[in-house]
Amino acid sequence: MSRKYYSFDKNLNLKQVPAIKKKEISKKLNFRLANYLNLGYYLIVPLLLGVFLGLSLDRLLKKKNFFFIIFFSLGIIGTFYNLIKIYFNARDSDKNARNQHQG
């Protein structure tokens, strides 16, 4: 016995839609899960690079925390940029998935 799936269209009319295959669902879920597992790397790498470069230049040029503050600030900006980029990509992919499902 096959199940019938229904969805609302843009005019809020109920219509029957084809069933989503389990492979499609699992591929999408695995892709999204992989993106969220990499979230930590996207957020911490710019900070660590800023700290490393800042401390290295301070030590090399014998300055006291001048380059550290500059590159740490750039690392914070890079972290927020990555966070915003991930948010908008996730929002757009959710919006596209909803529009594709509603047909």
Image: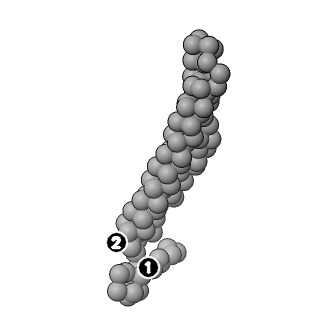
* Tally of numbered discs: 2
Q: Looking at the picture, does residue 16 appear above or below residue 79?
A: below
Query: In terms of secondary structure, where does tag 2 sit?
Result: loop
At horizontal 38% and vertical 69% (from top left) the residue drawn is 99
In the rendered image, residue 103, in percent from the top left (x then y), is placed at 34, 72
Q: Establish if 52 lies above or below 59.
A: below
Which residue position holds label 1? 7
Which residue occupies the foreground of this view, 66 or 103?
A: 66
In the image, 70 versus 26, the foreground residue is 70
With respect to residue 72, does 63 lie above or below? Answer: above
Res 24 label: none
Q: Position of residue 7 (x, y in %)?
A: 44, 79
Q: Can the viewer see residue 83 in this picture?
A: yes
In percent of the image, x 57 and y 25: which residue is there?
Answer: 67
In the rendering, at what x and y percent does residue 16 appear? 40, 80
Image quadrant of residue 41?
top right
Is residue 28 something one can see in this rendering?
no
Q: Position of residue 19 (x, y in %)?
A: 45, 69
Q: Amino acid at mark 2?
A: Gly
Which is nearer the eye, 23 or 8?
A: 8
Q: Amino acid at mark 1?
A: Ser
**Residue indicated by mark 2:** 103
Q: Within 10 Å of the Cα at label 1, are there few (<14), some (14-19), or many (20+) other Cα atoms?
A: some
* Gap between marks 1 and 2 measured at Cα: 9 Å
